[in-house]
Image (cartoon, grey):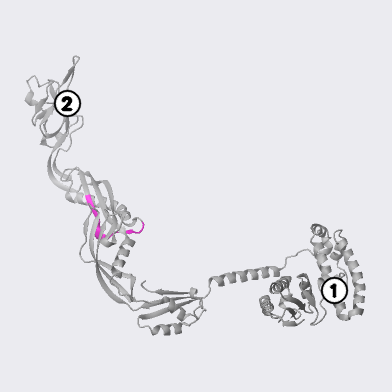
């Protein structure tokens, strides 16, 4: 039967060997493998070779003088031979086991731990089996030597040694073997561990190596290429309506949804009156007028009321005193409050609580039945030079109160909802109300001032306006042009019309922007891979639509762009 020799190199990998087996035309193959070959170093490759032969219908023979390689081949079920054309002997034809020394060189003296193992109950059967195998192997070896020469003697040693190694491994993996090994006299078998400085140095070196690999992995060569394209400046007018009445933008109608934001704040403070003038002021106050005369209401025109010491105060307006209520013989007078002012200026009318009568009714039945009482002192009567509340005092007080409110309105302008903005022309602060007590021109050392401020802003989402303007600009571009969206500059063609009641802003915008020729960044990337910076700039110099190119390589020692396009980033300025 024809055989084909397949020669395997020492460093040839398993994949190459399998391809040779599968592509061979002859059914019977001798694999000629040199000692120490790569595929002889583990049993996994032997199994893969066996499977490859079975799947392709090949009969394989491993021809090698490598002892461990032959053992692995036998375990995988391959036929083995020591030379080409020699008799093939497989594991099934073996009649005995060899000595452990056939595989592991024997030592001149047995170490202490071997003596301990020799005394282990679990390993005694294995050692006894080894002794028996050795004696049998010696006899069978002599017989085989006579029949087949030195080669078969060597073969008997290797193959029977492989069987003994298998038995030894199976025996040592029994669960009680490890337990028995733990009983070995450690003092005789093992040295105690002692720390040496070299261990620390070695550990630091390993750690540094690991960290170095990590850092290198994170700093793989990369390139950032920045392209500055040639620009063409254009200007386009765009009309837009920002409306809080529309919850959804309608670009087809030029409407962008917006919101009307309102902030209302009040502030009060006390201030010094600094105005000076000659004054002649009358005291003022309040009285309560009583009617015990009749159950009918009493109408009084502007009337005089007099204190017991003769000081006259006038009511500031006509009034009607309700009639008295008479029930079960008890009379409850009708009453009404009234503002009064002294008949003459001066401090002497700043009187305390008092009872008043009406001089006009003196001597009549009503004279004692209609009267008035004050519960609070009169005040404000003054003559001569005095401090008064001036217009400057009120203006200054209002300014200080506005300054107190300013931080709150600044927060209102800056802390807008996410992605919202407003134009300064669509923001308004106004003084909604103000008051002072006492009023302007009144004599006083101190006065109180109050203000109420209202701020309004029509806001919109920045993205909505940007998208709308981009849409309008794209309609004006040729197919071979690109819009540099970051180049837009927006201004008003005329002041916008703001309606804070409706929350709308109607604006005519002037949009200044740059356009460039379309650039194929994917082609650029392929063209500059593995190129140096000078070469890249030379490549881009032929493009008239590119002004300049900047190349940044990292780490710092890199001089050439990576070959992997994913490590190259191209940025076009303005996009």
User: Is residue 372 shown above or below 58?
Assistant: above
Q: CA distance from mark 2 to mark 1?
A: 135 Å
In the image, which disc is placed on residue 149? none
Task: Describe the element under mark 1 as helix, strand or loop.
Answer: helix
Q: Quadrant of residue 504?
A: bottom left
**Residue 181 falls inside the magenta stretch:** no
> Few, some or many C-alpha atoms within 10 Å of disc 2 (few <14, some 14-19, many ≥20)?
many
Residue at 22% in and 61% down: 496
Q: Nearer the viewer, residue 120 or 329?
A: 120
Q: Nearer the viewer, residue 186 or 53?
A: 53
On the question of residue 105 being in view, the answer is: no
Q: Position of residue 57 (x, y in %)?
A: 71, 74
In the image, which disc is placed on residue 102? 1
Q: Position of residue 372 (x, y in %)?
A: 15, 26
* Disc nearer the start of the sequence (2/1): 1
Q: Quadrant of residue 297?
A: top left
Q: Between tags 2 and 1, which lies in front?
A: 1
- Residue position marked by numbered label 2 in the rendering: 335
Disc 2 vs disc 1: Cβ atoms closer than 8 Å?
A: no
Task: Describe the element under mark 2 as helix, strand or loop.
Answer: strand
Q: Nearer the viewer, residue 10 or 356?
A: 10
The number of callouts visible is 2
Start and end of the magenta stretch? 418-431
Residue lying farthest top?
A: 329
Residue lying farthest front?
A: 1
Residue at 61% in and 69% down: 210
On the question of residue 471 being in view, the answer is: yes
Left or right for 421, reference 226:
left
């Amino acid at each position: 039967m024809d055989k084909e020799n397949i020669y395997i190199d020492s460093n040839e990998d398993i994949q190459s060997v399998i391809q040779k087996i599968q592509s061979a035309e002859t059914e019977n193959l001798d694999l000629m493998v040199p000692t120490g070959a790569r595929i002889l170093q583990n049993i996994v490759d032997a199994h893969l070779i066996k499977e490859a032969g079975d799947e392709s219908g090949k009969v394989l023979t491993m021809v090698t003088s490598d002892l461990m390689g032959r053992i692995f081949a036998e375990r995988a079920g391959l036929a083995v031979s020591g030379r080409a054309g020699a008799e093939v002997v497989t594991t099934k034809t073996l009649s005995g086991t060899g000595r452990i020394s056939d595989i592991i060189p024997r030592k001149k003296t047995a170490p202490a731990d071997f003596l301990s193992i020799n005394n282990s109950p679990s390993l005694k059967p294995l050692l006894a089996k080894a002794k028996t195998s050795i004696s049998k192997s010696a006899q069978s070896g002599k017989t085989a030597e006579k029949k087949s020469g030195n080669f078969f003697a060597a073969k008997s040693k290797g193959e029977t040694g492989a069987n003994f190694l298998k038995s030894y491994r199976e025996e040592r993996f029994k669960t009680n073997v490890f337990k028995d090994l733990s009983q070995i006299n450690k003092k005789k078998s093992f040295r105690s561990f002692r720390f040496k400085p070299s261990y620390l140095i070695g550990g630091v070196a390993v750690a540094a190596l690991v960290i170095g690999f990590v850092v290198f992995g994170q700093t793989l060569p990369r390139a950032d290429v920045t392209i500055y394209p040639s620009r063409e400046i254009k200007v386009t007018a765009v009309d837009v309506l920002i409306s809080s009445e529309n919850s959804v933008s309608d670009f087809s109608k030029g409407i962008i949804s917006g919101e009307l934001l309102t902030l209302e704040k009040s502030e009060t403070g006390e201030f010094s009156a600094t105005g000076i003038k000659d004054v002649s002021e009358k005291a003022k106050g309040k009285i309560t007028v009583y009617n015990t005369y009749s159950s009918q209401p009493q109408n009084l025109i502007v009337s005089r009321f007099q204190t017991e010491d003769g000081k006259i105060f006038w009511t500031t307006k006509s009034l009607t005193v309700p009639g008295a209520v008479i029930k079960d013989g008890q009379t409850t007078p009708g009453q009404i409050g009234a503002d009064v002012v002294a008949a003459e200026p001066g401090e002497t009318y700043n009187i305390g609580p008092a009872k008043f009568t009406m001089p006009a009714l003196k001597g009549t039945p009503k004279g004692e039945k209609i009267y008035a009482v004050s519960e609070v002192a009169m005040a404000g009567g003054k003559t001569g030079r005095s401090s008064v509340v001036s217009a400057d005092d009120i203006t200054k007080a209002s300014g200080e109160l506005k300054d107190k409110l300013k931080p709150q309105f600044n927060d209102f302008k800056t802390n807008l909802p996410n992605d919202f903005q407003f134009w300064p022309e669509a923001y308004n602060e106004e003084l909604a109300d103000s008051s002072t007590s006492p009023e302007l021109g009144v004599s006083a050392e101190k006065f109180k001032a109050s203000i109420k401020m209202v701020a309004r802003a029509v806001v919109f989402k920045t993205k909505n306006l940007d998208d709308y303007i981009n849409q309008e600009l794209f309609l004006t571009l040729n197919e071979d042009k690109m819009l540099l969206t970051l180049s837009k500059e927006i201004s008003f063609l005329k002041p916008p019309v703001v309606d804070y009641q409706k929350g709308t802003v109607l604006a005519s915008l002037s949009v200044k922007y740059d356009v460039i020729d379309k650039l194929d960044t994917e082609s650029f990337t392929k063209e500059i891979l593995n190129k140096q910076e000078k070469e890249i700039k030379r490549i881009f110099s032929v493009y008239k639509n590119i002004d300049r190119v900047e190349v940044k390589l990292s780490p710092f020692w890199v001089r050439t762009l990576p070959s992997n396009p994913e490590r190259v980033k191209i940025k076009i300025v303005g996009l």
